[in-house]
Image (spheres, rainbow, N blue to C red):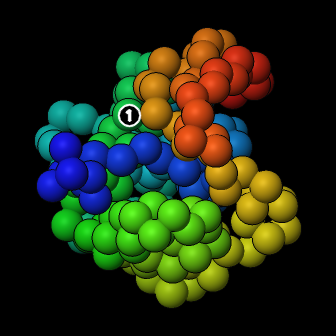
Amino acid sequence: CKSCEPLCDGLELQAWREKLQEESGWGTSRFALEGNSLFGQRTWKKNAGLIPLDREESETFKVTKFDIIRASVKAYKKNLNTHKSYENLRHERYKMRNNLEEISGLELSKYLDNYSEIKDKYVYYLQKIIEQNSLTDFDYLLLYCTFISFGPICLWKNNCWSYLLVQSRLF
């Protein structure tokens, strides 16, 4: 519906890839390997998650653990599309779409400062990842489906649905 478009949106593939690289080292981090956690999402539930080795003693958070990788992607997508910390990101993305502008992951990444404790430095790192890996090539792709393990990803490109088969060492 039009009234919820800024909240219910696809996830730009570029943003997904940059976060995957930054948060889990392309899926090679301890959290990715032991807990299928690709995006470093935190939890404060008592009996859930993995304790970061470098966590301060005064801290109580853990990194969310998932049964399957797909659940990690789904939770990340839900987080960006619903959490109040990313209202500005959703609003900017909505404005871009409404004005029929190209969605720029590089531009939208500046609204991810609340994803990390290091704020603007984190945005700087994400933007470097985008630039150094030519991820702007993926700006026009959207990740809509949650089934991504050696299966189809639905993509919206040039006002048309298309499908891409994902084959990656990670999945």
In percent of the image, x 69 and y 23: which residue is there?
A: 164
Q: Quadrant of the N terminus?
A: top left
* Numbered disc 1: secondary structure: helix
Inspect this view and state whether residue 61 appears. no
| Percent x, y of residue 152 | 60, 16
In percent of the image, x 27 and y 52: which residue is there?
A: 5
Instruction: Give left or right: position of 72 versus 2.
Output: right
Which residue carries the number 1 mark?
74
Instruction: Give left or right: position of 2 versus 147.
Output: left
Q: Quadrant of the C terminus?
A: top right
In percent of the image, x 64 and y 44: which residue is there?
A: 158
| Percent x, y of residue 114 | 36, 74
In percent of the image, x 18 and y 34: which residue is there?
A: 47
Instruction: Give left or right: position of 22 versus 118.
Output: right
Outermost residue to the top: 151
* Rendering quarter of residue 92: bottom left
Instruction: Give left or right: position of 106 versus 4.
Output: right
